[in-house]
Image (cartoon, grey):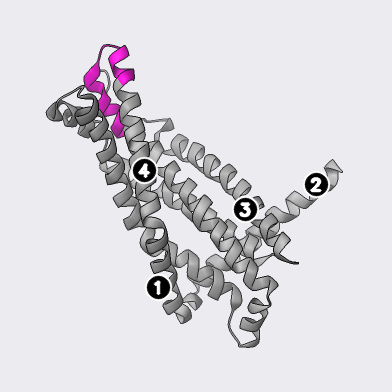
Amino acid sequence: MLRTRVQDGALAVGDGALVSGQILRGIGSGRVLRYFGEVLRQSSVLVTGSLVVVLGMVLALGLIVGIQGSYAARQVGAPSVAGAFAAIGDLREITPYAFGYMMAAKVSTGYVAEIGTMRITDEVDALEVMGLDSLVYLCSTRLLGTWLVLPFVYALAVGVSFVGSYVAVVLQIGQVSPGGYFELFWKFQSPQDYVFSSLKAMTMASFVVLVGCYYGYRVRGGPVEVGTATARAMIVNLIGVHFIGIIGSQIFWGGIPRLPIGG
């Protein structure tokens, strides 16, 4: 039984890599531009359906980071360090993970349900009969649409998380003055950190979109299988998001944290 599960898992990984490669080739070859109207539609759906969720989540997490950082800094006798704690925690870890969780829970599972329903109702086969490349039309357009809008959404999310931490530290707890907060806040981040944080978040977003498209496109059977595929996609997404987060932090900041501490 265990051997069979391992074999099935290995086959699923290989099949997922194959389908993901075909989706990426659809973008790299330019074939997806035939359906650029669908790309724009998917981008608009992503913004209108997920922007408020993303900003609300990162605002709440920014508040939490500010509160935790304030009391942690107070315990070590350095209350002004709360600004540095917020700069590091929000930009490097909290906002990318919030982005990955949101994409996994809302966007990716939605793609599984949507594409999977099209598969079991023979709509995907109908696209093929009409002469459309179903994989490019359904999956490559969604991935390209994600790439078009999410960098801007992520930049806005980072700003909102910073606002949340500022409100918690300066306005709610009142632990440090605005000048003292920003003095350390800006010292503990750099343009490189923004680039690395964006790369980390976009890698998470691309991964969960590919997972959602794969599980939706490969659904066979009926509504029960669509639900099963959605649950499997969520599990894979959670594992993948944390793996990307760990590897990304190790690559970008593990060896050279770039923190102005010490002489």
Q: Are marks 1 and 2 in contact (CB under 8 Å)?
A: no
Magenta stretch, residue numbers: 71-87
The secondary structure type at the circle numbered 1 is: helix
Q: In this orientation, does residue 63 appear?
A: yes
The amino acid type, in three-letter code, at marker 2 is: Arg
The residue to which callout 4 is attached is 58
Sequence-earlier tag: 1 or 2: 2
Quadrant (top left/top right/bottom left/bottom right) for the N terminus: top right
Q: In whole angstroms, how far apart are the C-alphas of marks 3 and 2?
A: 17 Å
* Label 4 vs 3, first from the N-terminus: 4
Answer few, some or many: residues within 10 Å of disc 1's Cα (few below 14, many 20 plus, some between 14 and 19): some
Nearer the camera: disc 4 or disc 2: 4
Residue 253 position in % (x across, y down): 40, 34
Left or right? Give the position of 95 relative to 207: left
Which residue is at 27% across, 45% downward? 159
| Front residue (pair 75, 260) | 75
Mark 3: few/some/many CA within 10 Å (<14, 14-19, 20+): many
